[in-house]
Image (cartoon, rainbow, N blue to C red):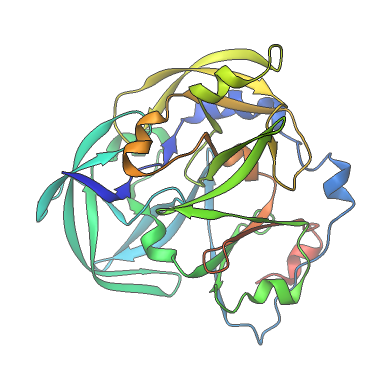
Amino acid sequence: MRWKIGISIGMIAGASLLSSVCAHTQARYSENTYYAASKEALQLPKAVNFTSVPYELVNGMILVQAEIEGQQGNFILDTGAPTLIVNGTGTGERSEEWQSVSSDFNVQAIRVNQFNWAGIEKKGIEAIALDISHLEEVYQRELLGIIGYQIFAGHEILVNANTMQIIILDGKKNCLSRIGKPITTIPFKMQDHLPVIKAKVGNQTYLFGFDSGCTANLLDQKLLDKLPEGAFNILDHKQLQCFSKEPQDVMVIGTSAIELEKLPSKATEYLVTDLSHLEESDIHIDGFLGYPFFKNLTFSINYASHQLSIWEIHNEEAEVMP
């Protein structure tokens, strides 16, 4: 049976791929006058109810500390994952077929008695067991699992790249919009667990999932075929490593033909892969925006109001953050 509410979207590209993909986009936001002219400090007064926790950035992957069944350790924060994933083979209640970007594979549905991250506590929830030990080798960190949508649904999460802090707020109160003015706010729609924003190529509209668990931007092969002649350059070929253990050889392209809603056009690099099989689980997208998209940004994603906001904060202003 295919698990319809659990579709693994998180992508792991690896350190060598990340350095190659991001080499030409190191200052893509900091050097852009659109952003430099729109910066405004974001200050959270003490009256606002929020939780702030540190995070570690390892080769484009956001790692946080969380506790599961009394054990504390590293978890990947992944806005593209549907649920809580526990590292291990597990002896679950049942076996399910799960879907990743490159393949289908079986996982075990298990019960977690207690999980706590940043004050978000879950008891008696269903999660899945998946062996991600190969990711521990890539990132040289022991991993207890992956935190997905099931855990932070209904909240607003702000990732501050300057202070290396994640701030969690009540999404329904939408406190950030009353405190400061973001550079831009991009509406998104949910496809199952996945936030999806619009992009354009000429007059045609396409959809991209926002995925903090992606260490690279991804493009569906079908959309590549629709790009105008001369609108992209083939930069390289790389091995793409997903949740499943089998790597996939993919093409790396650069293009400025894909324009994201409410953002200026930029030359952007994408890994090209086939995403059509995701349609079997009602995920209809043309690509993913990952680490290269948000690497130099402070951004917040509100799962209640369905808004992705981008903030820009000077280093000296970051001191006002918790």
- The image shows residue 306 at horizontal and vertical percentages of 57, 62
32 vs 130, left or right, is right
32 vs 91, left or right, is right
112 vs 10, left or right, is left
* Residue at the spot 50% in from the left edge and 69% down from the top edge: 155
- The image shows residue 221 at horizontal and vertical percentages of 49, 22
* Residue at the spot 52% in from the left edge and 52% down from the top edge: 56
As drawn, 155 above or below 290: below
Who is closer to the viewer here, 10 or 139? 10
As drawn, 19 above or below 180: above
Who is closer to the viewer here, 14 or 40? 40
Q: Quadrant of residue 278?
A: top left
Count all numbered tags in the image, as a single digit.
0
Who is closer to the viewer here, 97 or 139? 97
- The image shows residue 296 at horizontal and vertical percentages of 69, 45
Q: Quadrant of the N terminus?
A: top left
Q: Quadrant of the C terminus?
A: bottom right
* Residue at the spot 45% in from the left edge and 70% down from the top edge: 118
- The image shows residue 105 at horizontal and vertical percentages of 22, 35
As drawn, 248 above or below 18: above
Q: What is the residue that sits farthest to the bottom in this orientation?
A: 47
* Residue at the spot 70% in from the left edge and 31% down from the top edge: 25
75 vs 186, left or right, is left
